[in-house]
Structure formats: structure tokens, C-alpha cells
Amino acid sequence: MRWRRNALTAALAPALSVLPAGRANGVAHGVGTTAVTDDRLSGAGGTAPAPDRPEPPTAGRNGERGADAGPARSDRTADRGAPRERLRAWAELLRVSALFSVPGDALAGAAAVGRRPGRGTVLAMGASLCLYEAGMALNDWADRDEDAVDRPHRPVPSGRISPAAALGAAGALTAAGLALAARAGRPALTVATGLAATVWAYDLHLKHTKAGPAAMAAARSLDLLLGATATATATPKATAPVTGPGTPGGGGRPDNVAGAAAPARPHGGPAACLPALPAALALGAHTYGVTAVSRHEAQGGSTGTPLAVLATTTAIAAAVLRESRGQVPDRPGATSAGTTANAKANADTQANADVKAYAVAFARRLDTGPLGKVTDPVRLLVVALTGAYLRTAGPPLLHAALNPSPPLTQRAVGGGIRAMIPLQAALAARAGAPVTALAVMGLVPLARSLSRKVSPT
């Protein structure tokens, strides 16, 4: 038997001599393909490195080991991805998907004063976008400590954007917004200054007080009034105002939610935005509700707030659809001085004409109902846009009321932000600007597609 063992050893000696030192028994050293999976002596159970089991080599991109693994990521790929990551961080900080809810403020304001969008409207939209983004950057700078606990993924607490950069962006955007408003005229600059002050006061202090929702509502209302003022004061005098059914000076449908008659020609000062005040109040009421819900988006737990905001949303929709009570349709309106003198001379004839006008208007109201003339295409557009507003804002609020969890509450806030676009369009259509209303609604697909990539909240 001994000679057989010696012969076997002599036969295997050449093969063992070609193996490197320490690799003769790959299994024992834990580096072979059949490495030990249960090392009871070391107590590692095959999961922790034992004294006689060296660390495995670092794996590469495709799972290679050792010298063939290569670097985990090439420097060229890292350099290529860095600008993209920075761009995405700024997009999240500024919430670019919510930007599409801003231009409609200026367009609805222009429609409320009975003017076609012009140079002043464009300047107002630029100023609004800058001030809106300034508020977003300032918001994350002011909430950086709170976000470090509740939203650590946000750009500032995650370290992707420094607090100094966020604050600097807020200041630069505010200055740019005021500069654009100044180009539209002194009245527009006055409104924009009040808007900027409201934004900074909200982010730095008022947000965490009971006055927070009211401050945000005031900011959104001022944004619409900025568009109205800039359009009315910056439009050249040679440009003819929009006249026709439903526009100021054109008779027919009232020009805003409350039905206040707007002058056919704009004033030269801040009073130019007064006809847009009812529409601004409607938009501010919606903003108040969205802000009230957003105060619970991090922790959730509020059922009454979404229900109250849902009731407010329904009331706003009813106000948009309601016919004007201030002036009965087809009733003779304001008259010139000569016509007034003639009317005094024929008081009896004028009284009879008024009675007939009221009778005709009352009969028409009975025939058409609270929505007005159902055959009027502009009126149908108002109804459709108001329905889109309810459809966008209503269901998420109802879901948040039934289940006030943070995800559903955040979804209700996002729905409220997106619902501003159809509300702005409905206000523009009610003011007699259907083309402007359709242009505003064209922003909905853009906002929806971008919100899938960047959250608006």
C-alpha cells in the first residue's frame, strides 16, 4: 500500500508544482468557486471574513473580479452626469412643473379689464414667473431645518444645492421680477412690489402662522392684478380695446365674476385693475384652500380641512357660472349726457322702456336657467372650463378627506395647483375672451407631463 501512495504522490507532483503559492487549496481559502459557506469554527457562517478567509476582490461594473473589473464608473460618465444632476436639483428646488399655473394669472387679468394681451401682459407674465420662482427658492431656504427631518430628499437638505445658492437665487429672481414689472410702468411696479413683499413675508414668517393661507391668497390675487394693471397701463392708446358680447363696453355678458361693469378704456393708474378685483378674489379663495391643505401634507391627519376646501371649490365654481345680478341682460345701460337730458324730457317713455326690458330679461332668465343661454358657445365654454376645474380639484380633495394620509394630502395639493389653470381659463372666458381661455388651457398638457418628472409640491 505504501508503494501505491508514493507512486500517486509522484504522479501528482508536476501538477501541484504549477499552482501559485497559497492557491493549492482554493476551497480552504474561500476564493474558489466552491468556497466554504458555513465556517462553524470561526462563527462567521460563511458571511463574515474569517482570519483564514481573505476579503473577496471588488466587483466591477459587470460583475468582473480582480484586475479585469476596471473602475466602478468612468470619470467621463461621472462628468457627463454631473450637470444633469445639478439641473434636476434646481428643477426640483424651483418646482418647474408648477410654473404653468402662473401665466394664466396675467392672461385672466388682461381679460378682466377687457384688453387683448399685449406688451404689458408679456412683461407681467415674466415678472410673475420670476417672483414665483423666487418664492420657491426662498421657501426651501427658510425650511431647510424642517425639511432635513420631514423631506430629506429635497435639494437643500440633501446637499445637492447649498443654502447660500438657494438664497442667492431668491434674491436674483426677485430683482429680475421687479425689473420686468418696471418696464411695464410705475403702476405695475407698485403692484409687483406689494407682491414681492408678500412672498418674502410669507416664506420668512407668515407661513407658520394662522395668517399663512391668507398671505398666499393675497399673493395670487396680486399676481392677477399685476397682469390687469400692466396690460391696461402699458398697452398703447392706439390699440383698440376688445369690444363685443361679454366684454367691457360691448354689452351683453358681464366681464367678471361679480358682474361689475368695466370701463371700455383703461385708466392711467392703479385704478385700472379694479375691474379685475372680483376675478382676483375668486382665484385668491382657491389659493387659500390649497395652502390650508398643504399645511398638513407632511404629517397628514386632517379630515375637516379637505372637506372645507372642497366646499369652497364648489362655491367658487358656482360663482363663476352665476349670471350677473348687477345689471339685467338687455337692460339699457349707462347713457351719455345728451341721452340723459333727452331721457329726462321723456321720463314716461323711458320708464315704460325699462319695464319692458325687465320683463324680457326676466322671461329669458326663466327660459335659460342659471347658466345663461345654453346656445351661446362662449357660455358653453365657461361651463366646460368650470367643469374641468371641479374635475381637477374635487376628487383629490375628497380622497384626502376620506384618508388623510400624507401621500393623498400631497396629491390633493398637487391637484389644487393644477386646477388653477382651468379656473384661470374659466375666468377669462367669462370675461369674454374665449381665445385667451383656450390658450390658457393649452398649458394643461405641459403641466401634466412635467409633473410626472418633477413634483409640483
Image (spheres, rainbow, N blue to C red):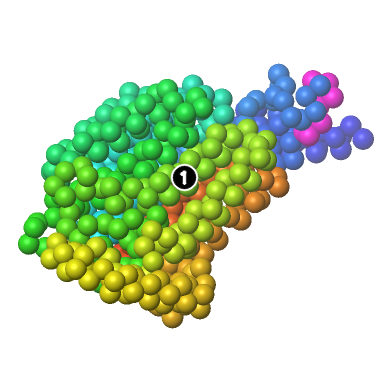
Q: If the image is split into quadrants, where does the N terminus sit? A: top right
Q: Quadrant of residue 37?
A: top right
Task: Give x and y (percent) for residue 269.
Answer: 16, 43
Residue 400 rendering spot, x and y as whole percentages: 64, 46
* Residue 385 vs residue 135, the one in the foreground: 385
Q: Amino acid at mark 1?
A: Ala
Residue nearer the viewer, 456 or 317: 317
Where in the figure is residue 46, as x and y percent of width and height?
76, 30
Q: On the image, numbered disc 1 is attached to which residue?
A: 285
Q: Residue 257 sits in which quadrant?
A: bottom left
Q: Is residue 223 visible in the rendered structure shown here?
A: yes
SS majority, magenta: loop
Q: Is 363 displayed left or right of 297 in the figure?
A: left
Name, please, the residue furthest toward the bottom.
Answer: 375
The verdict on residue 37 being magenta is yes
Q: Which residues are magenta?
A: 36-42
Residue 421 in view (yes/no): no
30 or 142, which lies in front? 142
Circle 1: element type: helix
Membership of 154 in magenta stretch: no
Q: Residue at x 21, y 48 (%)?
A: 272
How many labels, in total? 1
Q: Is residue 444 above or below residue 7?
A: below
